Amino acid sequence: MPTVIFQLPDGTERKVIAASGTVLMQAAVSGGVEGIVAECGGNASCATCHVYVDSEQAELVGPPNDVEDEMLDFTAAERRPTSRLSCQIHLSDALDGLVVHVPEEQV
Amino acid sequence: MTSTAGVVVVGGGQAAFSVVSTLRASGYDAPVTVFAAEHHLPYQRPPLSKKAHTEPEGLRVELVPESFYRERNIDLRLGDDVVALDTAAATVVSRTGARVPYAHLVLATGARNRPLPVPGAELDGVHALRSLDDALTIGRALTTARDVVVVGGGFIGLELARVALARGARVTVVELADRLLSRAVSPELELPLRERHEHAGLQVLTGTGVRALEGPGRLDRVVTDREHLAADLVVYGIGAIPRDDLAREAGLAVDDGVVVDEQLRSVTDPRISAVGDCARHPHPHAEGPVRLESVQNAIDQGTLVGRRIAGSPASYESLPWFWSDQGDLKLQIAGLRSPADEVRLVPGDSPERLAGYAFRDGLLVAVETLNWPAEHLAARRLLERRTPVSAGDLAGTTLGALARARRAAEVRA
Ligand SMILES: Cc1cc2nc3c(=O)[nH]c(=O)nc-3n(C[C@H](O)[C@H](O)[C@H](O)COP(=O)(O)OP(=O)(O)OC[C@H]3O[C@@H](n4cnc5c(N)ncnc54)[C@H](O)[C@@H]3O)c2cc1C
Ligand code: FES
């Protein structure tokens, strides 16, 4: 299963091995990555699982879906071109080595 | 105090998890012990009424794996509940006889279901939903149920009703009040919500009391004060009662929940805090002390107490918000509405979307949305920052549009 890397606002890095069939948000929460609050548990209701995909990999990960796209306008931290809700990113081996940046604030 | 006393948390739910994960993330390094009555790792409850019945065995609801607690040196005692607090000795006593001293005690005991006070409530085929075990039981019952009666038209009842409907049962919701979700949602929004449920095939009886559940051994009908309903499964959800008995027995102030101050400390004993469903607390958005039953409240209160114990005190003022998925309806609420507030319904940009703006003294205080998460988030951003939004500001526009315009203006300034 893919390994994903979370870069935290304080400059540190967390590597997490994702379980099969999960979404990025779950990998973060299981790995105890601070800063992914995920209040709604992946229900596309809260926007507290916001991440910035590394710009080199943005194309591989793909764009947000329609509802997600609208929600991203109202995240706590500023929206950037590679903003995604991590509960909407489905992991697969193709995303092994994915790097995402965790924003300063989620709520 | 002995040097071994650290934090003891009573309860292994959403709020307890938030406390202990925050403590360790904030650098707290004294002992942390969690007593959790259930045998499951701390888990999320929302999926239980929304998903657990479609995929009960496959559903993963635990918040984090067991290794999370181990790696952080959190002593998680599953299946052992605290039975007494000795506040004079600052020690808790568990059912298995463990005595653990504390420097800080956090009560995160949640709530239990209000029992159904009618004859027959103990029959086979009658269930309430609170725990993962309940959800698995109801999930199994739904594989054969043909006629399902849901007693109580609140969030859990309506969510379950739509799950049962999706599984092919005939479903009737029986509600004593004259409308659905009477405590939580405005009458204005309730109407379209009810219409959509009926359109999807739910039978909804409001203003109807249940008198008895009957059957020879096993349930087969529900007697209401209007008619008899055939039923091979009854699920009831008629509200929750805070689990505050430990606190009461220990002599702490209790009033439908453990009474705490704005930093969530017991008003009787500052070494004890209460968080989540079991706490009654002051809130800047409410007129008097409130007790909130939501994931947001459990997480934010746990975070606040964890940080306070680790050395960063603050007052609790998070904006309350809530969501409920009822079949294809995603209902979200931001802020606290009171019955006297004026509600204006505003259609969304597609037929399934709808928002209700609640105004008090001409200013926006709460927003209810159907199938419109972006509008809900915009509401949260504006209400959280306490940006005054008047009824006039919202004439002919939506909060989303207003928030975007204000953000753009900030960027230009
Ligand atoms: C079916 C269902 C669906 C829900 N859906 C939503 C939703 O969609 N959105 C939302 O915002 N909220 C929802 N909620 C509400 C939300 O789950 C609760 O508000 C939240 O779980 C409260 O967290 P808590 O930690 O205070 O209590 P809980 O999560 O209930 O945890 C309390 C735990 O403490 C344990 N305990 C109690 N006494 C003791 C003791 N003496 N010793 C040891 N352990 C003890 C209990 O066994 C329990 O496991 C739902 C609730 C239910 C039941
Ligand atoms: S976890 Fe709530 S939107 Fe992703």
Image: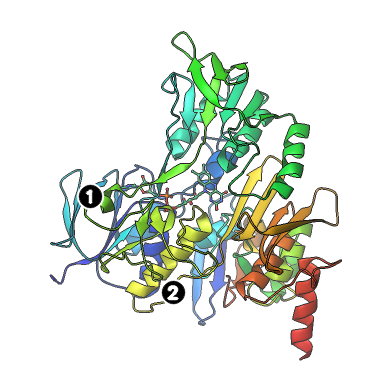
Tag 2 subunit = B
B342 sits left or right of B71 in the view: right
Crowdedness of circle 1 by 10 Å Cα count: few (<14), some, many (20+)? some
Instruction: Identify whether B71 is placed above or below B184.
Output: below
Which of the two residues, B307 or B220, is positioned nearer the viewer here?
B220
Tell me where residue A39 sits by quadrant: bottom right
In the rendering, at what x and y percent does residue B287 appear? 52, 64
The amino acid sitting under disc 2 is: Ser
Instruction: Identify whether A14 is placed above or below B348.
Output: below
Tag 1 subunit = B
Mark number for residue B315? 2
Q: What is the count of numbered marks?
A: 2
Could you tell me which residue is drawn at 76 percent across and 67 percent down? B399
Same chain under badges 1 and 2? The reply is yes
Distance from disc 1 to disc 2, alpha carbons, whole Å, reads 27 Å
Could you tell me which residue is drawn at 76 percent across and 43 percent down? B192
In the rendering, at what x and y percent does residue B7 appear? 27, 65
Q: Which residue is mark 1?
A: B249
